[in-house]
Amino acid sequence: MLSTPPRWDLSNIYSGLDASELKADMQWITDEGESINVYYQKELAPLTSTAEPEVLAGHLDKLVERLNQIYLKAGTIGAYLHGCVATDSYDAEAMRMNSRFGIIMVQVQNVSTKLEAWLGKISKALPQALAIDGIAKAHSFFLKEAAEQSQYLMSEAEEMLAGELSLSGARAWSQLQGTVTSQKTAEIDLDGEVKTLPMPAIINLHGHSDEDVRRRAYEIEMQAWETIKEPLAAAMNGIKGTVNTLNSHRGRKDALHSALDMARIDRQTLDAMMGAMQDSFPMFRKYFRAKAKRFGQEQLPWWNLFAPAGKAGKTYTFSEATNLILKNFAVFSPELKDFAQGAFENNWIDAEQRSGKRGGAFCMSVPGVKGSRILCNFDGSLDQVMTMAHELGHGFHNYCMFQAGKTELQRSTPMTMAETASIMCETIVFDAIVSQVKDPQEELAILETALISDSQVIVDIYSRFLFEKEVFERREKSDLSADELCEIMENAQKATFGDGVDERYLHKFMWTWKPHYYRYGLSFYNFPYAFGLLFGAGLYAIYKERGDAFIPEYKQLLASTGEGTAADLAKRFGIDIRERKFWEESLKVVEGRIDRYIEL
């Protein structure tokens, strides 16, 4: 195993940007998109809900098969190109090809929109057609959902225009945010040496063992974002304005309406979860104040929010982190451990911090090779070890779907359920580590790492939800200045962190570098994380009760997250996500950690 953070290997996807296979596949998608459009115009468009069920079933079979093929190829190309630009925004050729691919995919999306509208037109006949054996029947959930969502489409001409304009509009704004933030660097004095670091590395210093380093990193970060806040505010306004305009024309109530549909939950579920989260703020503030006392403070300044505790000097080489993850994954399931070992040995992980690479972490599926790729910014901290475990959980989720033979349309998982395996893997590592610790100071350090994550997913996520909600509301009336965005962010943090954090030192620029705000096709990319944490905690409790007997059903759940609503999938384990009680019970797990933390 490598002792230093590696870069990932994309060569089994395509040998390079100039690979003939890549060019051929891009051309195939172009041709297939045009061919499906012709098929739609000649064969499908004339059909109505009065057509014979057998005729509709035959066409639906052909349609599903062709869509699976095109999304398989597109998903593979998209993953490869994103893998190139996310790790090197200076690569002009990769950026150019990614832009070209975006143009191709707009045409594919336009055809998909036409097909969705057609499914809505024949929706009354769908039940009979889908009762007939065939590939369409196996994709009933996807087809029925598409038909239902078609009510929120504009006219065909308007949808086509919106798709084409997105290239020079919302997509361009999103790309600007990614490029600007990934190329931003800052200087900081570390151990007597002035270093120029990319922003993810500066942000990671929030977890440094030395408070002086944390404070200076915070101040430097604030100064850095100040210098580029205007283009990022323009990007935010462009994207949120686009979403508001399209939602209005599509008959959506608001941006949250579409986000809930994409998450496959209803407002009752969201209200139950968010209500339980809000009620938990006092216990988190108790944790924040207890942590502040360690530094002789009444409230935490932001730079101490991520400060380690206990024996905080422990750092991990990449090899040590790898071994720690594999050892604890094996406790849960040898299959999970074998999957993770393969990810490490086959260089699926890009963990090195460097300029031009995007911050944060993610896992992307690569369907053409039935694999995944994981990006993180490893700095040796336990937090980054947990981040790798989290992203490997996403990879295992992909693995379960591939193993079950799920098609691209069947694998379309909402963000709420997409966090299930990742949170489970984090919990596995945490639970295994803390159960083996004998030294109270080591236990304190591990609890701190977990509570930092828990507070981010519950308290900070709620602040991000409030922020985005207000941004959408204000954006309907006018553009927002960078200073207004900072004000909204600070107010959201005051409302959630409360008296646990020092109001003089909040993070008003949190909106600049979080890429979630800049995805115009998926608004409110925040509450699904809380859903994942709490749903995962509930599932882990069931695992602790049932042991190994739980794992086959758990794998089946992961394999089928693209084929049901969150409520229906949760029912398999006797969970009612529309009731606040479930969410409150999951939050009690965190409360137990806080009580133990204060005790130590």
Image: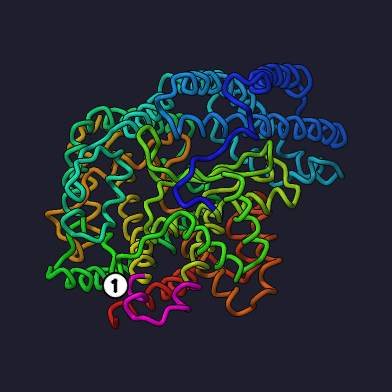
Residue 158 shows in this picture: no
Q: Mark 1 points at which residue?
A: 310
Residue 73 sits in which quadrant? top right
Q: Residue at x 48, y 44 (%)?
A: 6
Residue 29's spot in the image, x, y percent? 67, 22
Residue 388 shows in this picture: yes
Q: Identify the coloring.
A: rainbow
Q: How many labels does the image show?
A: 1
Quick one: 89 or 319, which is closer to the camera? Answer: 319
Report if residue 219 lies within the magenta region: no
Quick one: 279 or 333, which is closer to the camera? Answer: 333
Image: 565 above or below 102: below
Quick one: 136 or 375, which is closer to the camera? Answer: 375
Quick one: 326 or 559, which is closer to the camera? Answer: 326
Q: Neighbour class for label 1 at 10 Å: few (<14), some, many (≥20)?
A: some
The residue range painted magenta reads 431-445
- Residue type highlighted by circle 1: Gly
User: Along the horizontal axis of the image, is 394 left or right of 313?
Assistant: right
Report if residue 442 lies within the magenta region: yes
Residue 504's spot in the image, x, y percent? 11, 54
